[in-house]
Image (tube, rainbow, N blue to C red):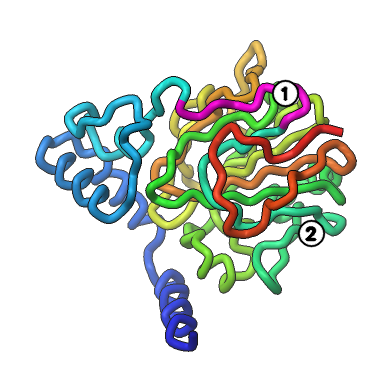
Amino acid sequence: MSGRNNRDRLFIGLQHLLPQHALSRLVRALTRCRIGWVRSALIRGFLRLHPVNLAEAEHDAIQAWGSFNEFFTRRLRSGARPVDRDVAAVVSPTDGVVSQAGQLRGEVLLQAKGLDYSAPALLGGDAALAREFADGVFVTIYLAPADYHRIHMPIAGRLRCARLVPGDLFSVNAATAAGVPGLFSRNERVICVFDTAAGACVLVLVGALFVGSLGLAWAGEINARRPRHICELPTPDPPVVLDKGAELGRFNMGSTVILLLPAGRARLETGLAPGRRLRMGERLATLV
């Protein structure tokens, strides 16, 4: 165990030293390279390392994707992720693994055993928005490299606002979550706020090492801007209205999604413990 702890500490220490944003820009360029042999080598190498189920993808031939990023953000074939259509069901927005889930203590969320962080910090300092989720519920979902990386609506909603919060790009794996205080409120992230049948619903799309960009269905690719400061993203007119299960966005490389719901509006399903594997569309909570 001590050997593993030492490796984790070394991994975290190296991340403090790395030029995180420069590396992410380099990876972004490489994963979008459309030179045939480069694309094929990247995809084949990735498939040797990670158990991707291509049988459920819209395409299963390497030649079908023009770049590694197209492969990584691949769509699934129709019916591969049935969405729970019960009007009371709040569903998982992504494939992935539960990192943490439960009830906020006031405006405090659990990051990992012994580590907490605050909703206002997560939400970019928006104290008024954070108060809407005091004593509410949250689910933090980690997307591993082999997972499907598109993000969908957990419940039908109307977009209230979306904002980009610049920050670090630490890894978001279990070791880093357990060793970097305030990880999710330090990392770069996009905050999407929707008005729903459960009241306000927030999805926080957290960036990570090599994940310097993501895409939103209504706004296209989102990248950090210079100077680096919190910025409101344009909201279309008429407003964006998305049904449960509709695509909200995608990660260009893997990361984490945090779902927040207000107090007294939804009851989490039993068994949402750390390590529980999820598939997009399965029930996470029930409206009350």
In the image, taking residue 14 as reference, residue 170 lies left or right, namely right
| In the image, residue 23 lies in the stretch drawn in magenta | no
* Residue at 76% in and 27% down: 195
Which mark is on residue 162? none
Q: Residue 186: image x %, image y %?
A: 59, 59
Task: Find the distance from the CA under tag 1 to the CA under tag 2.
Answer: 30 Å
Is residue 214 in sight in this rendering? no
Tell me which secondary structure the magenta stretch mostly adopts.
loop
Q: Which residue bears the numbered disc 1?
A: 86
Q: Nearer the viewer, residue 77 or 160?
A: 77
Picture quadrant where residue 178 is located: bottom right
Q: Nearer the viewer, residue 179 or 232?
A: 179
Label 2: which secondary element: strand
Q: Amino acid at mark 2?
A: Val
* Residue at 64% in and 27% down: 84
- What span is in magenta? 80-89
Q: Residue 223: image x %, image y %?
A: 45, 40
Looking at the image, which residue sits at the far bottom?
A: 2
Give the quadrant of the C terminus: top right
In the image, taking residue 172 as reference, residue 57 lies left or right, namely left
Which mark is on residue 108? 2
Looking at the image, which residue sits at the far right?
A: 264
Total residue callouts:
2
* Residue at 76% in and 44% down: 268
Q: Amino acid at mark 1?
A: Asp
Q: 10 Å neighbourhood of mark 1: few (<14), some, or many (≥20)?
A: few
Looking at the image, which residue sits at the far left?
A: 37
In the image, taking residue 191 as reference, residue 29 lies left or right, namely left
Q: Nearer the viewer, residue 283 or 232?
A: 283
Q: Residue 248: image x %, image y %?
A: 55, 28
Picture quadrant where residue 28 is located: top left
